[in-house]
Image (cartoon, rainbow, N blue to C red):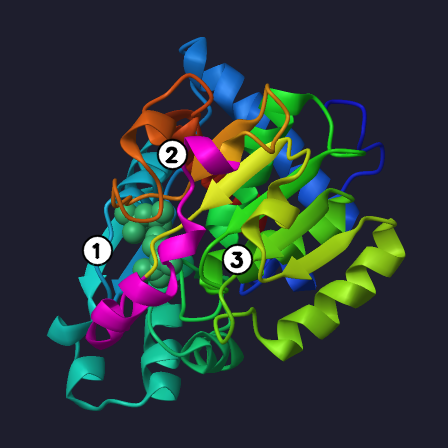
Amino acid sequence: MSGVVEKKVNLKGKDLLTLADFSKEEILYLLDFALELKQQQKRGEKHLLLEGKTLGMIFAKSSTRTRISFEAGMNQLGGKAMFLNQSDMQMGRGESIADTAKVLARYLDAIMIRTFEHEIVEELAEHADIPIINGLTDDFHPCQALADLLTIYEEKGTFAGKKLVYVGDGNNVAHSLMIAASKVGLDCAIATPKNYEPSAKVIEMVEQFTKESGSQLLLTNDPIEAVKDADVIYTDVWTSMGWESENEQRLKDFAAFQVNQELVKHAKSDYSFLHCLPAHRGEEVTADIIDGPNSVVFDEAENRLHAQKAVLASLL
Ligand code: CP
Ligand code: NVA
């Protein structure tokens, strides 16, 4: 991607709550920077851009990739990361978000938070004068979408004229992918069962971004229509964290939305398969697809590390 972004982008001090707050140039800059950091890491070159800096990581939900890639990323950048289980903090006993934000900002250089309501992250950002990074809320997962764009770029070499298809729940991952794609000019189709569509607010926002970037957005309840000529097929779990009580109903409602050999026949033969992970083989995707030759899910998981290092080094 080098050369795409001519002008120097300055993201110092900015929050990453959703990619909606980032311009196309800023997103391309982060991807370009991530590729550079990835190469440096592979060559074994030190890149201690955050020596002496501390990232606090607040978790109210489980995590493997987000927690470990942020912590490893801070180490590789010469800084430190601190895992903070929300239920062990006074926040878990009712201390206000505003007071927590003001106190943590006196100790830390940035906060990454994974929680439920997106409004919690917004409130934290309002009261903390250090960068706040959204590590997943019920509505958005921007760090995942950045890694996904990086993976798509590595696989396809461009965004223009390529089609990303998301099949499944219109959830946090779908929202962030739609925003990311519409910002960088990647065509996007989203196929969900009825009543599981992306939020109206996100659709309205993304329709505006597509006008600016010239990309296409298709929303449908028909997975075959969506997958037609796909360059990338993406899915996520049918039951996200926090929705476990609906699991039984969801298994029925999503049954026709499994990514399997029948469905991928409608995509381009060189389609790439992406999944944010964790995956449920036999539910949203069959094992032969996620473990098959078109799957790049582990490259995608690796790219969480590189994309987030670019975010950290840019914001801090
Ligand atoms: N994709 C992702 O965010 O994974 P974790 O829940 O393991 O962090
Ligand atoms: N949509 C999933 C993503 C997990 C990384 C969830 O919110 O549980």
Query: What residue would you read off at disc 2?
Result: 301
Q: Secondary structure at mark 1?
A: strand
Query: Is the shortest distance between ligand 1 and the CB of mark 2 under 8 Å?
Result: yes
Decide: few, some or many residues near mark 1? Use Cα within 10 Å; few <14, some 14-19, many ≥20. Answer: some
Q: Position of residue 4 (x, y in %)?
A: 81, 29
The one nearer the camera, 27 or 274, is 274
The residue identified by callout 1 is: 83
Q: From the viewer's perspective, is the residue at label 2 or at label 3 nearer? A: 3
Q: Which residue is mark 3?
A: 174
Write the start and end of the magenta stretch as one range: 239-263
Question: Would residue 211 be found to the left or right of residue 59 on screen?
Answer: right
Can the viewer see residue 60 in this picture?
Answer: no
- Which residue corresponds to the image point at 15% horizontal and 87% vertical from the top-left? 93
- On the question of residue 120 being in view, the answer is yes
- Numbered disc in front, either 2 or 1: 2
Q: Mark 3 or mark 1: which comes first in sequence?
A: 1
Alpha-carbon neighbours of circle 3 within 10 Å: few (<14), some, or many (≥20)? many
Q: CA distance from mark 2 to mark 3?
A: 17 Å
Q: Position of residue 256 (x, y in %)?
A: 42, 54
Of residues 61 and 8, the one nearer the viewer is 61
Three-letter residue code for mark 1: Phe
27 left or right of 194?
Answer: right
- C-alpha gap between disc 3 and disc 1: 27 Å
The residue under the point 40% across, 36% down is: 260
Task: Say what secondary structure mark 2 lies in.
Answer: helix
Q: Name the amino acid, label 2.
A: Ala
In reply to whether residue 102 is colored magenta, the answer given is no
